[in-house]
Image: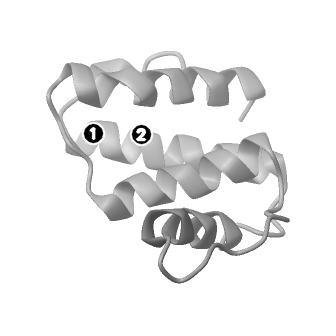
Amino acid sequence: MSKEQFEAAAAVVKTAFKEAGKSLSNDELLALYGWFKQASVGDNTTEKPGMFSFEAKAKWESWNKCKGKSQEVAQGEYIKIAKELLTKYGLDAKIQGF
């Protein structure tokens, strides 16, 4: 997977579901978030949010699960999940380019 494919996938994910009126589940969103952050930033070195910061804590944990994976591997995982979700929600045509 190339960085260009990852960036294309991220751009499609950012708009395709909303434009189609589709809502992803929290688990789906968190999976995308974790791999996106690992692919674009690398390992999570931030402090874990407090127990009452539910959304921030869930995002932190999702990203932290990807720790140790290279940015290239994370890009591939993100693209894989993006393709699965686009297919699941009938948006296969949006996959072109990545």
The residue beneath circle 1 is: 87
Q: Residue at label 2?
A: 83
Residue 73: x and y in percent read 75, 52
Q: Position of residue 36 (x, y in %)?
A: 63, 45
Q: Is residue 50 visible?
A: yes
Instruction: Out of 1 and 19, give the one closest to the viewer.
Output: 19
Residue in the image at 44% along x and 72% along y: 54
Tell me what residue is drawn at x 27 percent, y 39 percent: 87
| Disc 1 residue type (three-letter) | Thr
Q: Quadrant of residue 88?
A: top left
Quadrant where the image shows the N terminus: top right
**Crowding near the residue tagged with mark 1, few <14, some 14–19, many ≥20 C-alpha atoms within 10 Å:** some
Q: Is residue 67 above or below residue 11?
A: below
Give me the residue at 45% from left, 64% from top.
55
Q: Quadrant of residue 19?
A: top left
Q: Residues within 10 Å of mark 2 (few under 14, many from 20)?
A: some
CA–CA distance in space, label 1 to label 2: 6 Å
Residue at 44% over, 22% down: 12
